[in-house]
Amino acid sequence: MIYSGKAITVRALDNGIAELCFDLADDSVNKFNQLTLAELKDATAAVAADKSIKGLLVTSGKDCFIVGADITEFGANFSKSEEDIAAEVFETNKIFNAVEDLPIPTVTAINGVALGGGLEMALATDYRVLAEGVKIGLPEVKLGIMPGFGGSVRLPRIIGADNAIEWIAGGSENRAEKAFADGAVDALVAPALLRDAAIDLLNRAISGELDYKAKRQEKLEKLKINDIESLMVFETAKGFVAGKAGKHYPAPVTAVKSMQKNSTLGRDDALKVEAASIGKLAKTGAAASLVSLFLGDQMLMKKGKKQAAGAKKIEQGAVLGAGIMGGGIAYQSAYKGTPIMMKDIAQAGLDLGMGEAAKLLSKLVERGRMTTDKMAKVLTAITPTLSYEGIDKADVVVEAVVENPKVKHAVLAEVEGKMRADAILSSNTSTISIDYLAQPLKRPENFCGMHFFNPVHKMPLVEVIRGAKTSDTAVAATVGYALAMGKKPVVVRDCPGFLVNRILSPYMGCFMQMVNEGADFVQIDKVMEKFGWPMGPAYLCDVVGIDTGVHAGETMSEGFPDRMKYDFKTASEVLYEAKRFGQKNGKGYYAYELDKKGRQKKVADESVWALLKDHVAPRKDVSDEEITERLMVSLCLEAVRCLEDGIVDSATELDMALIYGIGFPPFLGGAIRYMESMGLANFVAIADKYAHLGGLYKVTDQLRAKAEAGQSYFA
């Protein structure tokens, strides 16, 4: 054994070849933590010192190659100054330079996913052989940063500036075929042939058949591109990338600028540019939020698996109520491998539900992401029916009928009598209390909420709502089903609106209040979209359905009258009475027309103001600052109340639910993260400015105490 550590070993093979193998102890994946980096430095020094070694093979002892850097270490590293971060990144890069500078040819055999630092390790070697079916990439921009182990320097010199910009600024995981076509790897082989192919390539380099020194030299010099080409490539890319990423996500454009600057330099000076760019990005709010989002997602999935541990696997599902929502649930279940019955009282509903599933699958086929045979298989896993026959085979039944308490009571009581006694019954209600819905049930311990967000196939979140009598068994089975459907489950306690819709309701209530005061809803939409929301509140009302929003508002006003009951007729209520229901009938706060691709496009409709004029104050100017502050304060305060009421276990789960459920701007990290980023004391001061406007802006005693004590919700 040439070198032996807890993450890396180096052993001698035949013909003077040494194998450096990554196999991090006590972990399911390889990653670059401080231990692995230190051992790579020592292992490389051991190889350099052994004059009998003629070539180095780099491999992995796990199913993946290397997933990247250990992101749990980012928090401590990013807390340092920009200059210190840059200095440490540059120092770390010397480890990879040492690999690149070995006086022997080097080949990496990429057997499984190689992302971020994993791919950068492979780029430091002379050749790369990739197994078919494996994805590789540099996704750092998704964390608000950019490659920091030499990726922005080496990749452009290997695959060209155009391709490197696409890979790095796009942050995509690239399929093996694209990686080979772009030149990121030198060979693409069947997994069973990977090791032999890599050794063969290494022997050819050792024998002199392949000139590894010339190949290496290209990575050490400036990028081979003239000034005019450079100007065209990088300047064009900066404009395109900036437009696509948006102002809230600086990493993609910074990465392009860094590549442009380092393209004229040799390796070591180019790496200093990369390091400086990393230091700058690491101190941005976007990086802090996106890293916390990544870690939050890991926490969410780990907790979900723990909650589902021991639960019986769901072999057969059922959904009651077809239509768009029921069809979406049926599609998601069948697409992810769990057969499902879809029951409705009318054939038209079944046709709509099956049509929704077929439409989604057809799009996958059109994009080349699914074969027609697979599409047919998924569709046959959905059994549309007008009767309850076969419902006794379902392990979980999801009720997804109209959001009407009386209708839900009747349907839930009826289906419970036809299900197996050990099967789980859940409701896809968005606002109605689970305890209330459980009243007519004989087995309330087997009942819980399973709240999907629309559109089901796109929105990751599922709220699993625990009622007062819901058993741990029911929660575990429902969480397991959500995970099997590819969703992110968050277990919450019962209350009107549960977690996400409860938090959203004051935001929408504040919107209604401001329109009532004379604010322009079009301006409000533009301000909040500029702030970072995927759509403004008026447009959101139209997308959800104004009728749906009005009914939900009634439920919330009954549940929280101190802050969600209004002494005026809301703009949405006025539009509802005028039968303007939003996108579903082409008229809401906006009117809707079809664009050239057949998609609904919103257009201004002045007739709305004619309907509203007798119910709202005359239009007045409101500052963008006031719009943002009032809407965000009302939302964040309700988030705090949910934590204080124990509706959700942690601030992390709350923030993740908002991001995955309603598209809270990811670069802000969630409501609680957003508050803490500005300082709780500052947030309280802003809220107090609007306290005279009512309960929506009332700061809780606990929040005020935390702000005064300088405490965190994440401690």
Image (spheres, rainbow, N blue to C red):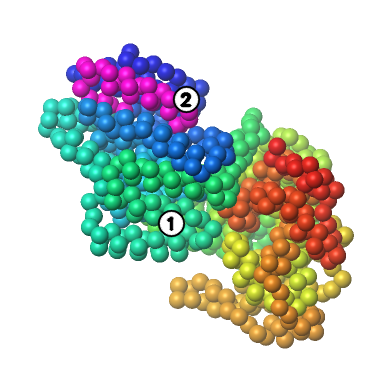
Q: Which residues are magenta?
A: 31-58
Instruction: Report the disc number at residue 176.
Output: none
Instruction: Report the disc number at residue 253.
Output: 1
**Which quadrant would residue 682 be assigned to in this image?**
bottom right
Residues at marks 1 and 2, CA–CA distance in whole angstroms: 32 Å
Residue 482 visible at all: no
Tag 1's secondary structure? helix
Please count the marks in the image.
2
On the image, the x and y values in percent for residue 359 come to 49, 62
**In screen coordinates, is 540 left or right of 37?**
right
Mark 2: amino acid? Leu
Residue 547 visible at all: yes
**Which quadrant would residue 698 be assigned to in this image?**
bottom right
Residue at the farthest front position = 83
Quarter of the C terminus within the rendering: top right
Residue matched to label 2: 35
Residue at the farthest top position = 1
On the image, the x and y values in percent for residue 655 come to 66, 48
> Residue at coordinates 32% horizontally, 15% vertically from top-left?
2
Q: Is residue 126 magenta?
A: no
Quarter of the N terminus within the rendering: top left
> Residue at coordinates 18% horizontally, 35% vertically from top-left?
213
On the image, the x and y values in percent for residue 681 come to 75, 50
Q: Is residue 41 magenta?
A: yes
